[in-house]
Amino acid sequence: MGKILIDKGIDATPVLILSVCPLIKERANLIPDLWEQSWFFFTPPVSYDEKVVQKFWKPETPALLNRISDLLKNRAISLLMLWI
């Protein structure tokens, strides 16, 4: 997986790669499938539906998403520490 990301110019941490692999292992049968099943974990969206964003984006949404991001980062670090 790391070589695929390097070939695509993506700098991903081992923690991110290790957390994505279990999520795609059931759907990836061949090496090229790894990228097809996981690209959205490593690249930002190119576009989005503005009407949907306007409908669901509330003033408190950025703070909530930042909190979720922090929780996920802490969870990934904790899992990595258990593995080591």
Image (cartoon, rainbow, N blue to C red):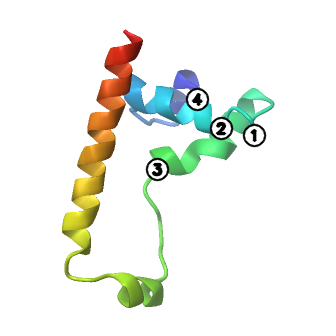
Judging by the rendered image, the residue that carries numbered circle 2 is 24
Where 81 sits versus 39, above or below? above
Judging by the rendered image, the residue that carries numbered circle 3 is 43
Judging by the rendered image, the residue that carries numbered circle 4 is 4
Where 67 sits versus 11, above or below? below
Residue type at the position of mark 2: Ile
x and y, in percent, of residue 49 in the image? 49, 82
Residue type at the position of mark 1: Arg
Q: Is residue 61 left or right of residue 15?
A: left
Q: Are marks 1 and 4 in contact (CB under 8 Å)?
A: no
Label 2 packing within 10 angstroms: few (<14), some (14-19), many (20+):
some
Real-space Cα separation, disc 1 to disc 2, in angstroms: 5 Å
**Which one is closest to the eye, mark 1 or mark 4?**
1
Judging by the rendered image, the residue that carries numbered circle 1 is 27
**Numbered disc total:** 4
Farthest residue in the right direction?
Answer: 29
Real-space Cα separation, disc 4 to disc 2, in angstroms: 15 Å
Residue type at the position of mark 3: Thr
**Which one is closest to the eye, mark 4 or mark 2?**
2
